[in-house]
Amino acid sequence: MTILDFKIDNCFFPSDYLYDLENFMWIKFADRVNQGKNTEKEFLIGITPVYAYIAGKINNLKLKPIGTLIQKGKSIGSIESLIHFGTLRCPLAGKVTEINQVVIDNPKVINDSPFDYGWLAKITTSENYDDNISLKKIDDCKEELLSQIRKYHVKCFKLFPDFQIYEIGTECAATLAKLDEFMDKSMQKGQVVRLVSDDPTADLELLRWAEQNQEEIVEIIREKNNALISSQTNNNNYLFNIVIRKKKD
């Protein structure tokens, strides 16, 4: 399991990866292919959590086939969601030696795990990546990543939500009734919903609700209500982001 050293606004970034922030991509050294003067190197390539959030729930992924020669900065494929279509640009020149069939079959894995299970492809290259000024170590780009996260209002969760429910200024009892109805009518087993509430008791009430209903609370994140949209009746300056996975059929 990858050790994730840096946490930026609840988003985690591995220290042993290199980041192409302009194109929201990362690479990770995988292996040396040949020995000798012209040693080729193999890298994993993928997208950052920032791009995974911007794109939304990814439902279609296309990648260049194995054996394709890719120029630096050119397309290695594309991703598509209900709200986004984007070109995936390779930070290095090289040849595609493997594609991740897991994400071809289930593109949402990229949203859920952009660094680990959600890698896109392996690239073999003889290019000296140390001289590639577009690729940066985490120590050299933490501030830029923070700027991107704030610019695009990125939220990183343990599981990327399939659905979003916003209940602002609503008492928790009414919110739970809506949540029950929504999960019963609109969600399948294993799907994930993000509930946003400004009720000051939302975290405790949802934990109690999940235990009673045998549903799974994936995580609860409390954040400052910077938008100042909290209802004056509950006088709460915080929002709860509660991520729930449906366990029952």
Image (cartoon, grey):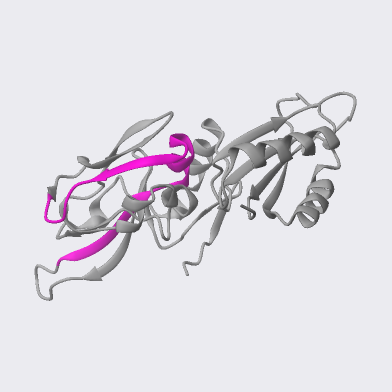
At a point 41% along the width and 60% down the height, the residue shown is 117
In the picture shown, does residue 135 fall above or below 199? below
Residue 69 in the image, given as x and y percentages of width and height: 11, 50
Q: Residue furthest bottom?
A: 35
The span picked out in magenta is: 40-68
Image mark count: 0
Residue 180 in the image, given as x and y percentages of width and height: 73, 40
Q: From the viewer's perspective, is 218 left or right of 128?
A: right
Nearer-the-camera pick, 24 or 138:
24
Residue 87 in the image, given as x and y percentages of width and height: 28, 36
Nearer-the-camera pick, 42 or 200:
200
At a point 13% along the width and 69% down the height, the residue shown is 39
Residue 71 in the image, given as x and y percentages of width and height: 15, 45
At a point 54% along the width and 57% down the height, the residue shown is 6
Residue 136 colored magenta? no
Q: Quadrant of residue 171?
A: top right
Nearer-the-camera pick, 21 or 190:
190
In the picture shown, does residue 11 fall above or below 125? above
Residue 61 colored magenta? yes
Q: From the viewer's perspective, is 88 left or right of 96?
A: right
At a point 80% along the width and 50% down the height, the residue shown is 209
